[in-house]
């Protein structure tokens, strides 16, 4: 890998970023995760084993790589300990090669409690949150009363910060019998794992600059997808962080000149978890077939994903705001036995034709997709690892995507395993 690459999702998450990062990490020296939290679920199939990572960069599976978790991530410290134990049980040693920014905000049990209570209050207007405490942790961060990893070095400050949070949000803590509201217990539990966390603490911004100046190749890994970005996605049905390329800069403390290439990950069709507009959603047997054939169940929550045809309008938006130059197309094989395949090439909104998403993304609730129909290829692609060996209709399908978006294709995934990949 000659360039420093940012990998971003171009849809509503679940595009297959874990596999793409795993493949690109083979030729990278350093992998750095820049935003999100344990609401992410990156699935990797390697060596006959399946790994699901929520916080640790996907590159950790490559035993010689150095990995970082940036300040833009909100870190569940207890969830991290669980992931480390799973990796250790599989013989993957992370000592001396997994480091975390001292400025990373922590997701604590009371954030998960608040997440659950808030979602219940929303009733039928729920956001479909994963209930992992991500939103409340980011709110505490922006409100400047969050707990950061570096606070573990000063226990008195740690307890004071948690007490301030309780005072700022008394409606959640007063008379609560939920043990997740027990500040004293949380404090004791944190102190018990503090030594293991402190040993991994570093200034990620400085370390990445050192690697850059030493000529190392760096892979920047994001979570979720562009259409879930808190500023540029389908707000309020979004996540709480910047999932787009700008999040890599602020989430790791790096300058734009450190980025050489932006790779967008695009699933060959579209999925979404939780609430929010989804113009190409299929609520019929075809949607069910996509879900079953694609194994579309959340790696984090296990919830069935909503499914639909590929949406080029949303992809144009994602590629533009990220400056995507190349795409990695995943799960092409899921379409192998579809006789007809539709692709959304535009929208209609109250009789007006649109080629881009509306300025007010909430209007996506009201758009009608305009489809172009393709003949399917009706033959298996999972055994193919050369582009020229693909069925002609599959090549046509991929060519339309690349031409419409004005990008190149660098990878095509035709299955879950590493070897089920076409490098273009």
Image (cartoon, rainbow, N blue to C red):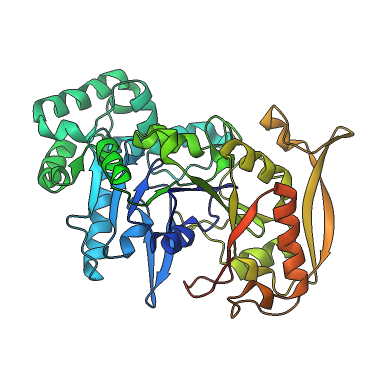
140, 123: nearer the viewer: 140
* Picture layout, residue 372 above or below residue 156: below
* Picture layout, residue 313 above or below residue 385: above
- Residue 224: x percent and y percent? 49, 46
Q: In the picture, residue 24 is in which quadrant?
A: bottom left
* Picture layout, residue 339 above or below residue 7: below
Q: Residue at x 44, y 64 (%)?
A: 23
Q: In the picture, residue 327 is in which quadrant?
A: bottom right
The quadrant of the image that shows the N terminus is bottom left
- Residue 53: x percent and y percent? 37, 57
Q: Residue at x 24, y 32 (%)?
A: 148
182, 199: nearer the viewer: 199
Q: Tally the marks.
A: 0
* Picture layout, residue 75 above or below residue 422: above
3, 40: nearer the viewer: 3
112, 76: nearer the viewer: 76
Residue 276 in view here: no
Is 332 placed left or right of 102 in the picture? right
The quadrant of the image that shows the C terminus is bottom right
- Residue 18: x percent and y percent? 45, 58
């Amino acid at each position: 890998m000659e360039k420093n690459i940012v990998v971003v999702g171009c849809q509503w998450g679940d595009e297959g970023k874990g596999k793409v990062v795993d493949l690109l990490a083979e030729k990278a020296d350093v992998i750095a995760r820049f935003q999100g939290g344990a609401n992410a679920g990156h699935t990797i199939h390697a060596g006959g084993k399946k790994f699901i990572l929520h916080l640790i960069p996907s590159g950790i599976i490559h035993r010689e790589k150095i990995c970082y978790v940036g300040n833009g991530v909100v870190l569940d410290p207890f969830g991290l300990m669980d992931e480390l134990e799973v990796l250790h049980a599989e013989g993957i040693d992370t000592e001396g090669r997994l480091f975390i920014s001292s400025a990373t905000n922590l997701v604590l049990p009371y954030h998960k409690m608040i997440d659950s209570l808030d979602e219940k209050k929303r009733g039928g207007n729920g956001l479909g949150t994963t209930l992992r405490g991500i939103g409340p942790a980011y709110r505490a961060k922006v409100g400047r009363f969050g707990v950061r990893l570096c606070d573990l070095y000063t226990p008195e400050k740690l307890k004071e910060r948690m007490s301030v949070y309780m005072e700022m949000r008394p409606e959640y803590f007063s008379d609560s019998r939920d043990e997740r509201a027990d500040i004293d217990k949380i404090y004791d539990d944190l102190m018990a794992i503090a030594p293991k966390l402190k040993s991994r603490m570093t200034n990620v911004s400085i370390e990445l600059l050192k690697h850059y100046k030493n000529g190392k190749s760096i892979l920047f890994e994001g979570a979720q997808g562009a259409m879930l970005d808190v500023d540029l996605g389908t707000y309020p049905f979004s996540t709480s962080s910047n999932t787009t390329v700008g999040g890599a800069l602020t989430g790791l403390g790096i300058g734009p000149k450190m980025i050489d290439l932006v790779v967008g990950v695009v699933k060959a069709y579209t999925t979404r978890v939780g609430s929010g507009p989804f113009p190409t959603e299929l609520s019929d047997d075809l949607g069910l077939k996509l879900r079953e054939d694609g194994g579309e169940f959340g790696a984090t929550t296990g919830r069935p994903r909503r499914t639909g045809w590929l949406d080029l309008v949303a992809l144009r938006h994602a590629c533009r705001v990220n400056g995507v130059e190349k795409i990695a197309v995943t799960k092409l094989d899921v379409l192998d036995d579809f006789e007809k395949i539709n692709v959304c090439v535009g929208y209609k909104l109250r009789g007006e034709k649109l080629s881009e998403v509306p300025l007010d993304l909430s209007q996506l609730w009201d758009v009608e997709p305009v489809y172009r129909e393709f003949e399917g290829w009706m033959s298996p692609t999972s055994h193919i690892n050369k582009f020229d060996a693909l069925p002609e209709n599959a090549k046509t399908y991929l060519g339309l995507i690349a031409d419409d978006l004005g990008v190149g294709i660098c990878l095509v995934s035709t299955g879950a395993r590493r070897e089920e990949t076409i490098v273009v």
